[in-house]
Image (cartoon, rainbow, N blue to C red):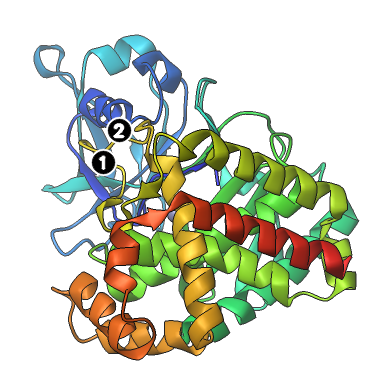
């Protein structure tokens, strides 16, 4: 619930100036100062105008009056990893690629994972330093310190989660990598894609010292679902659907597991008590001042609606509660049917989804989305908590 995301980071961003890139990330609410990014590895890809990567291109840093420096070359995937000093960042150098006398642009993408506020220095992962295990179409990355038992568990989870997302959304999840990184810092992976067996795998990193495995697996399921929806429906899919379903699927997944599977993952009574107690307390503290939440107005964090916006975290449990009651009333199939129906209206996902749910499940759905009662979120948390506790 408190996961900090760079929403839809699978969209590459073009970079022409390094300090501008970092200032963008700061204004977005990702971290506090330019200094936090000094010495951090950034993965860049040199691309042509059709966004095809250019292997073995020179990468050039332009320091304006101080001249240009060839800083290195891209690898066979067109990528290069670079870190900058504080002074270098301040100078705001330009960056571009060159090959056979032609100049190319540079794109940057990354995925971050952190709990709560990012106050620590960013920790960037070099994927090559991690070990891997295959999990069907997907990959588990891990630091050497991860035990054999947890490695096996990671593979088991990736397989289970892929099946669950496929059944829940009615669509094949995108190729995925989960990285278990031995650090306490906010963890970044850049670039966040690797080529593996002819497919491009999105890799999402987690710090294993900052969070427990059941939380990490739940967050992984959220990110995987969200990026899968983003792949099929693009960034224009409203947040109450993409982020909402991705949040609810965590609960739906836990509800689908057998008592033995729950135990194997590490979900026990104590874990459930802690999680729900925290969630309910947050909603109780909010209810007098904010008896409802407008899910239709819940937006992805960006320059205007920052990650640090105080209302932002409440959308998660609220949207999760919404989907719990919708699927309780009309079955999980309503999710697949609605997603299938809106597919043909990329300009109009929001209106069409509301219309579909109104006509096929609940006539009061629009009013409910606009004014979702905080009390109903608490009721939902109580119901699910009881159900899960009864299983153990
Ligand atoms: Zn999300």
Quarter occupied by the C terminus: bottom right
The mark that comes first in sequence, 2 or 1, is: 2
User: In screen coordinates, is 17 left or right of 55?
Assistant: left
User: In screen coordinates, is 181 left or right of 267?
Assistant: left
The numbered dot on residue 45 is: none
The crowding category of the residue bearing disc 1, from other C-alpha atoms within 10 Å (few below 14, some 14 to 19, many at least 20), is some
Rendering quarter of residue 80: top left
- The answer to whether residue 4 of the structure is visible from this angle is yes
- State the SS at label 2: loop
Residue wearing tag 2: 28
State yes or no: discs 2 and 1 in contact (Cβ < 8 Å): yes
The crowding category of the residue bearing disc 2, from other C-alpha atoms within 10 Å (few below 14, some 14 to 19, many at least 20), is some
Q: Residue 15 at x, y = what percent?
A: 21, 39
Q: Residue 305 at x, y = what percent?
A: 26, 38
Q: Is residue 341 above or below residue 144?
A: below
Q: Residue at x 26, y 75 (%)?
A: 354
Q: Residue 9 at x, y = what percent?
A: 36, 51
Q: Quadrant of ligand 1?
A: bottom left
The numbered dot on residue 302 is: 1
């Amino acid at each position: 619930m408190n996961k900090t995301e760079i929403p839809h980071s699978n969209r590459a961003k073009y970079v022409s100036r390094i300090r501008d890139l970092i200032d963008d990330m700061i204004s977005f609410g990702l971290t506090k100062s330019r200094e936090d990014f000094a010495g951090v590895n950034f993965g860049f890809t040199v691309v042509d105008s059709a966004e095809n990567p250019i292997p073995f291109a020179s990468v050039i840093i332009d320091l304006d009056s101080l001249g240009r420096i060839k800083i290195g070359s891209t690898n066979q995937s067109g990528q290069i990893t670079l870190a900058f000093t504080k002074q270098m960042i301040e100078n705001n150098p330009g960056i571009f690629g060159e090959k056979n006398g032609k100049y190319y642009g540079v794109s940057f993408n990354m995925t971050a994972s952190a709990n709560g506020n990012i106050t620590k220095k960013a920790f960037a992962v070099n994927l090559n330093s991690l070990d891997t295990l295959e999990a069907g179409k997907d990959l588990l990355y891990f630091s050497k310190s991860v035990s054999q038992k947890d490695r096996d568990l990671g593979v088991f989870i990736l397989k289970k989660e892929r099946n669950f997302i496929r059944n829940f959304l009615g669509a094949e999840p995108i190729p995925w990598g989960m990285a278990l990184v031995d650090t306490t810092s906010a963890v970044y992976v850049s670039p966040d894609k690797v080529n593996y067996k002819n497919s491009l795998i999105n890799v999402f990193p987690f710090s294993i010292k900052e969070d427990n495995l059941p939380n990490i697996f739940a967050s992984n399921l959220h990110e995987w679902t969200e990026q899968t929806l983003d792949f099929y429906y693009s960034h224009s899919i409203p947040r109450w659907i993409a982020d909402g379903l991705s949040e609810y699927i965590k609960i739906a997944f836990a509800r689908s597991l057998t008592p033995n599977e729950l135990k194997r993952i590490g979900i026990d009574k104590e874990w459930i008590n802690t999680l729900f107690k925290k969630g309910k307390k947050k909603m109780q503290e909010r209810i007098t001042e904010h008896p409802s939440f407008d899910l239709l107005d819940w937006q992805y964090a960006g320059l205007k609606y920052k990650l640090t916006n105080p209302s932002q975290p409440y959308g998660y449990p609220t949207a999760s509660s919404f989907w719990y009651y919708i699927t309780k009333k009309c079955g999980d199939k309503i999710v697949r049917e609605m997603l299938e129906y809106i597919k043909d209206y990329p300009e109009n996902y929001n209106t069409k989804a509301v219309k579909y749910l109104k006509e096929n499940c609940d006539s009061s759905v629009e009013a409910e989305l606009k004014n979702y009662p905080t009390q109903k979120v608490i009721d939902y948390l109580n119901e699910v908590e009881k159900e899960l506790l009864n299983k153990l």
